[in-house]
Image: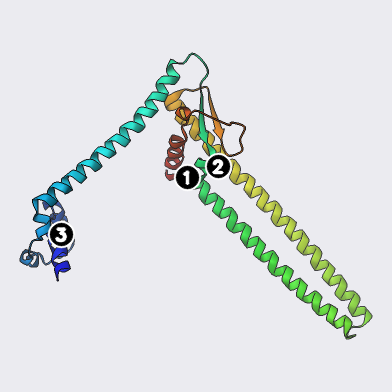
Amino acid sequence: MENNNIENTEQTHINPQEEQVFDENVELETPTLKKTKSCPLINNPMYKAIAYVILLIAIVLIYILHFTSNKDSDKLANVISSSNNSVMLTVNNDSIIKNFVLAELLTKDLETEAIKYQQELANKQNSLQERYNNYQNNVQNNVLTQTQIQNAEQQLQKEAAELQGLQEQYSHILAAKEESVHREITDSIINAARRVNDKKYKADYVLATSTGSAILYANKIYDITDEVIKELNNAYKK
């Protein structure tokens, strides 16, 4: 009963604008709400004070994160504009691939197609193996004539060759699609990095770092990975 009272009390704290929207779209029995009892905890001054403090802290944190991000970005832009030497920005490819929505979708599609081909080849291989086992049993039991044996061997060899050819065909299809996916992702990253640099930094180079790359260390101040990821996903959503 106490839980029901609390839920009903929460419903009574609807601001006038929200209440108007509800009345226009849904037929609510609003008179029953007036009969509910107020929750002592919500009306407690100490509870309200704590709630206000928590809300204030949350707002402050949001502003801090927002302005800190902008300050870091502006700081990098100032460093580049005041430098007389060539400036190199960096992006982390591993992080981009992990957070780029389109890259994830394309990779999953490729994996799904590969699994489909593997399953088809496995089924054909099992079927061929079963017929070969039956052929051997018939030969051992002397139930086949010499002509039947020759015909069966030729048929099995033909199907084995066809299976091998199909396997090579699927391998080529997957290799071509993998190359296409890799090229599409790479082009997207390059174009996004170029747009970010042209809009804000005007740096001379943008280098890609990743696990095992030739770049062993790069100063984080020159890293624009997060901005490139945002640019990529925004472009994909459009």
Label 2, on which residue?
A: 185
Q: Which residue is mark 1?
A: 99
Q: Amino acid at mark 3?
A: Glu
- Is label 2 or label 1 in front? 1
C-alpha span from label 2 to label 3: 49 Å
Give residue 216's quadrant in the image: top right
Q: Secondary structure at mark 1?
A: helix
Q: Which mark is residue 10?
A: 3
Residue under the point 21% across and 45% down: 54
Identity of the residue furthest to the right in this view: 146
Q: Crowdedness of circle 2 by 10 Å Cα count: few (<14), some, many (20+)? A: many
Which residue does the image show at 88% across and 82% down from the upper left? 140
Near-viewer residue (200 or 69): 69
Quadrant including the C terminus:
top left
Query: Which corner quadrant holds the N terminus?
Result: bottom left
**Secondary structure under the numbered disc 3 in the rendered image:** helix
User: Where does the image place residue 222, in percent across and percent down from the top left?
Assistant: 47, 27
Residue 57: % across, % down: 23, 41
Q: Nearer the viewer, mark 2 or mark 3?
A: 3
Q: Are marks 2 and 1 in contact (CB under 8 Å)?
A: no
First in sequence: mark 3 or mark 1? Answer: 3
Report if the CB atoms under discs 2 and 3 are less than 8 Å apart: no
